[in-house]
Image (cartoon, rainbow, N blue to C red):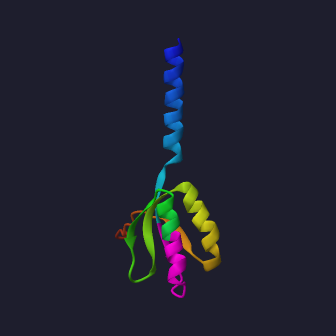
Amino acid sequence: MRFFSTIVAALAVAHGASAVDIQKSIIVSFPSETTDDVVNRAKDDIRKAGGMITHEYQLIKGFAAKAPQKIIETVSAWSAEFHAVIEEDQMVEISKSHDN
């Protein structure tokens, strides 16, 4: 009976740990006048939380990342002052319209 209780507890802990680490793909962009240190702070915060920068954009001041939800909320809160836009990265398709 004790063995069964230990297994159940271990599974509960494992499930809880995996739920906390759910990563989302995001795009973070800043207005062009934003200083590089602000952008670098956002990237550093994401890396420190276990996320990763997947792409750094050249045409816009921004980057793509995979990051835990908690740090996305944190970066979103402090970067609002700099008018950052944080959105979920997703596939976009262009389809031909069907006129009847």
Q: Nearer the viewer, residue 72 or 85?
A: 72
Q: Which residues are magenta?
A: 27-42
Which residue is pictured at 54% across the width and 19% down the height? 5
Residue 55: % across, % down: 37, 70
Residue, far top: 1
Which residue is pictured at 63% across the width and 70% down the height? 78
Residue 44: % across, % down: 49, 68
Q: Is residue 100 visible?
A: no
Quick check: 53 above or below 14?
Answer: below
Which residue is pictured at 47% across the width and 53% down the height? 23
Residue 61: % across, % down: 46, 81
Left or right: 74 in relation to 100: right
Which residue is pictured at 50% across the width and 36% down the height? 15
Q: Is residue 93 visible?
A: yes
Location of the C terminus by quadrant is: bottom left
Quick check: 10 above or below 61?
Answer: above
Residue, far bottom: 33
Residue 60, image quadrant: bottom left
Residue 1: % across, % down: 53, 11
Q: Magenta includes 54? A: no
Q: Magenta includes 36? A: yes
Number of labels in the image equals 0
